[in-house]
Amino acid sequence: MQNDVPDMREEILQQPNALRDLLEDKEEILQIGQILYDYEKIFCVGCGSSLSTLFSVKSVSSILSKKSLDVHTGFEFYYNTPQCENSAVILTSQSGETSDVVSALKRAKEKRAFTIGITNEADSTLAKKADKSIITNAGHEKAIIATKTYINQMATLYLFLGEIARLEGNKNTLLSDIQKLPQIIEDMIKATEKKEKENADHFKEVDGFYVLGSGPNYGLAYKTAMTLLMEGVEIHGCPVLSGEFRHGLIERVEKGIPVIFLTGGYESDEITKKAMSFCENLGCNMLVYDFNWYKDHTRNISNLCAPFILVIPLEWFTYYSAQFRGKDPGATRHIGKVRY
């Protein structure tokens, strides 16, 4: 194992305070939620980890709100622009300079949409050129795979949605649950590191995982596969909607195949559990992350917040998986060098 790499580890530990700093300015975020309430259609644009937060919030919106959210990755929005006149477009990018997202911002403004940028960098193109912008106040982040910026960006989106749902008359606990998250995340960081180091050691020889999730957890499955595993550990990762397991992956799994399952106690997790049972019977090499297993630390928050909880052990698993393989989980080989 290589020498300790500080960036990702330090940034995992910084997440509770980064979120506390964001929530100190939550009134500005809630005001933008009030603006969004007046739009019939909202488009959401992001890439990588940012896209994964949008998948999660779209699912939460379908549960809590009447508002329709349409999620796009950056260049797909640019080249296949939907009819977004008189609509709001939320654009997400930790750096505020992601070329895909900046291009989408340009196209959205050409279409006369109202644009909202969510970024961690106040001097970025996205922050300066969007009609409204939220700076996520996570502090500088070096590790490419996004830990504290992921948490703060998703919290911003959840606050938007919680305020919209409140204005719609939905008596949910989302806004109060977000307030509890800094301490919950702090507890989760302490409680899960040892076990995930053991898991990383156990799986250090595998060359990839399928990652299944349903509802809000599909966004986390996407992040786990696309950024934590492929960028952080440099192994293969494939995100799969639990409901799609029987349409393809069911013919690929067999004894020893590594599969990660994310469950949150959603109604749709009925099909997640069926996939788990099938894989267990075959002898697949399974890792399961269940929101309900962490009840001692979650202070009775809604399972809609499961991605905030489950990402913490997955971050530790990523960190130690990279360490056992001699990789730097915060570095990249090609991202930032290849521009198009």
Image: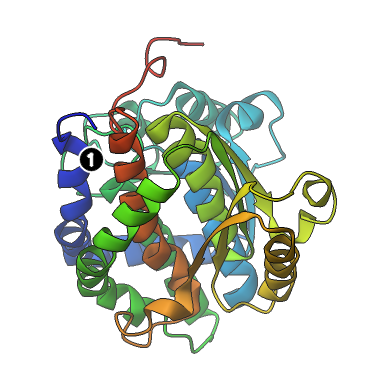
Q: Nearer the viewer, residue 53 or 261?
A: 261
Q: How many marks?
A: 1
* Quadrant in the picture for residue 321: top left
* Quadrant in the picture for residue 267: bottom right
Label 1 SS: helix
Query: In what quadrant of the picture does the N terminus appear?
Result: top left
- Whether residue 250 is situated above or below residue 48 in the rendered picture: below
- Whether residue 205 is situated above or below residue 166 in the rendered picture: above
Q: Residue at x 53, y 33 (%)?
A: 207
Q: Residue at x 73, y 64 (%)?
A: 275
How is the rendered protein coloured? rainbow
Name the spot of residue 72 as percent of width and height, x first.
62, 40
For residue 86, say whether it is visible. Answer: no
Q: Nearer the viewer, residue 335 or 198?
A: 198
Name the spot of residue 60 as percent of width and height, x first.
56, 68
Kind of residue at disc 1? Met
Q: Residue at x 34, y 64 (%)?
A: 31
Name the spot of residue 50 as percent of width and height, x first.
45, 43
Q: Is residue 144 left or right of residue 254?
A: left
Q: Is residue 115 left or right of residue 284?
A: left
Q: Residue at x 19, y 45 (%)?
A: 9
* Quadrant in the picture for residue 190: bottom left
The residue that mark 1 highlights is 8
Q: Residues within 10 Å of mark 1 (few under 14, many from 20)?
A: many
Q: Nearer the viewer, residue 239 or 142?
A: 239
Name the spot of residue 210 as percent of width and height, x first.
62, 46
